[in-house]
Amino acid sequence: MAAVFLLASMQPSAAAAALPAEPPLVSEALAQIARTGIRLIYSSQEIPPALRARNAVRGATVEERLRSLLGPLHLVARPLAGGGYVIVRAPAPPRSRPQAAQVVPSLEQIVVQTSRYETSVSSSVTAGRAALENSPETHNDAVRALQVIPGTTAAGYTARTHVRGSQDDEVLFRYDGVTLHEPFHLKELQSLFSPVDPMAVDSVTAWTGIAPIEYGGEIGGVVQMRPRRITRPTIDLQISEQGASAMLGTPMDSGRGTIFTDLRLQNQYAPVGWIDTGIGRPTLNDLIVHGTWRFDSGTLLSAGVLAIEDSRKYFSTENAQSKGVAGGEYYEWLRLEHRYSTALSSVTLVSGEQSHENVSGSVNEPNIVTGQLFEHSSHSIYTLRQELRGVPAPRWFWHVGAEVTSVALIDRSSGYAAFSPPFFPDLQPVRSVLADEAVAAHAVTYALYGSVRWQAARRTAIDVGVRRDTRRFRDAPGDSQWNVRANLRETLTSRTTLRIGWGQESQADVLDPRVSGGVAVPQRARRLSQTDFSLDHRFIGGPAARAELYYKDEGSPFSQTAYLFSPFALLPELAVDRMSLNSQRSRMYGAELSLSSDASRELSGSVSYVWSRAEDRIAGVWVPRAWDEPNAVKLNALWRHAPFSVAVALTWHSGWPYTPLLASSDTWTDPGAVTLAFAPLDSARLHNFFTTDVRIVWQRPLGAGVFQTFLNVYDLTDAHSICCRSYAVLRSPAGVYRLIGTRSPWLNITPVLGVRWHF
């Protein structure tokens, strides 16, 4: 019923005159049209990210909508012979002789360096900065934009995301083309936040299916974040319960160069403290500095720095655990884009990353486990990437690239855990576990890749790519993997587009080697085959629909460590519920249906339904993964009526599987007389998950800029969706032991109040 109400409300309102103080961004309006299957090609020189429309987008046809949006900006959309439109500056002919629309010969003839063109054959989703800021689901976090897309799953309040059933470490994140490895604050506490502020982002593009071949190394999904483009002096300041942030940017030398700095200082008591009031108050800081310099019309140099600092101390009164962590990460990069001619261009990237972390902690759960842990880890990564793009003929486009990465890492840990009966020997095979390990390794990876795109017919485009990845450790044999991807796009009608994708991909990690015979050797490479079908259709009046089918088959054996009670254990290395799972094969499949309205309406939104399964073959039996959710619904709505805007995000999905703990007796006097055992893996399910997040904004134009006050409320309905189970053993004065089991929800109602001023 909520979806019916939403769609019924997507008509033009008589109150349309009361639009927000700021008109919509042109790039977002174009992205809304492009998501319906219409190819739109344009240069960021003609349409800067900060350019705003001068009136609402209107019209029943694509041509009418583009004309209403672009006409006041002295731009025109010219049809391409292969389908779609290219947006160029309108000529200034004599008034008495208006020019007829000119058909541009082909898509691939348009090559403008340092400009952004949507030419990918594969299916992707793009969200602009304003969309990230308006969505309560993103929690002021650019990486969380992935969680808004149908088919993605997050374990409650976390920035980690499972894409169509994949592991949460199988997603590739890039910022300005730089690969970000594990880009999360609080990695040891469910990775609750990422270090990328939406203020520092122009747009986020995500692929949940077959991504272009240049995005390799991860088999789950791809998130590409483009840095914020500065076209005028800009200040963006924000203060809330979660901390403070400041973004300052300015063009230089009449726009020839730009620079911006984004700094966030966070004391994450809210909502960390709402998850567990006894968990401590971590302090998280991150800094992004990005600059560009245009040497001439065909050469652009970009440089950037991303610094992450975490200093935190945790304590959990419930589980008698304490932990201190001090660490940081530092990225730096140079990116050179150059156009040799209208038919040849290149991108060169040099980047480096340094990371370090020190951990100390202890656990003392009476009658269950006691232990201590000390860890030190560090790594350095240096990458050189070179890509070339060319247009040899009007209907052909090629892209080749090479990448070499050098990795040096150190990982040392020492500690112990002693388990008490009956947790030993029933759940743990040995009474005492030592955590002593020392890994020092150096590895080099190489990648060669290339793709060809062919406009086979006016409505048909084909993209085929091949990639070869190789990794070599200093003291271990190397290995290589072939990767192949292919996409077909067929424009069935002016409103309907069919896409078919197929790929074989691999993920060969280098940051988590194991020690065998005193030598660091790599983990087994993961291999995945997947097939995608998608159908996009745009209805008259603006709403757009998408239907997708996918099947993913991971045929390579894979070992992983699972924690069967709670993902929030501060010291998972010493947890009593730690278990090693060996999967012989994995399969993930599903169907996704989504419907979205015209984002320019006063009331807009989207609704999606996903049916999916994610399973591992363990000991000859198909076992659902811990994040398997057969049914999921997402509903997003945004109402804007100056000076207010209200955004609502509703999420519902099937309860996740879990493994019950079976005890021969709830009480005992002799620990040797009772037995504990796990039921069959993931044989039971939690209650269905439901949450509603709300964001309310009031804004007022000032003499300089806009002032906003906002209220974000997470889990407004206080659904108490269960996330975790824990156990305690209590001893009475009479010497009787009792096993107590508890369940904890993800979040209570969590309000975050803040103010913002920007211009």
Image: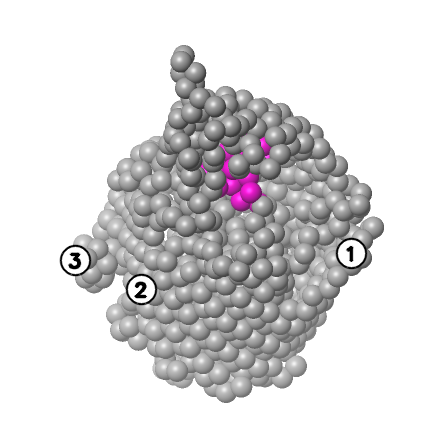
Question: Which residue ends up furthest to the right in the rendered image?
Answer: 475
> Label for residue 14?
3
Work out which quarter of the rendered image holds the C terminus and state it: top left
Question: Which residue ends up furthest to the top in the rendered image?
Answer: 733
Q: Which residues are magenta?
A: 561-579
SS for tag 1?
A: strand
Which mark sits nearer the N-terminus, 1 or 2? 1
Task: Check whether the beta carbons of the residues at disc 3 and disc 2 lie within 8 A of each other.
Answer: no
In the rendered structure, the answer to whether residue 631 lies left or right of residue 569 reads left
Which mark sits nearer the N-terminus, 1 or 3? 3
Eyeballing the image, is 657 above or below 97? above
Work out which quarter of the rendered image holds the N terminus and state it: bottom left
Q: Which residue is mark 1?
A: 472
Query: Which amino acid type is shown beneath numbered disc 3?
Result: Ala
Query: Which amino acid type is shown beneath numbered disc 1?
Result: Arg
Closest to the observer, 737 or 243: 737
> Label for residue 595?
2
The residue that appears at 47% across and 29% down in the rendered structure is: 673
Which mark sits nearer the N-terminus, 3 or 2? 3
Eyeballing the image, is 347 above or below 269? below
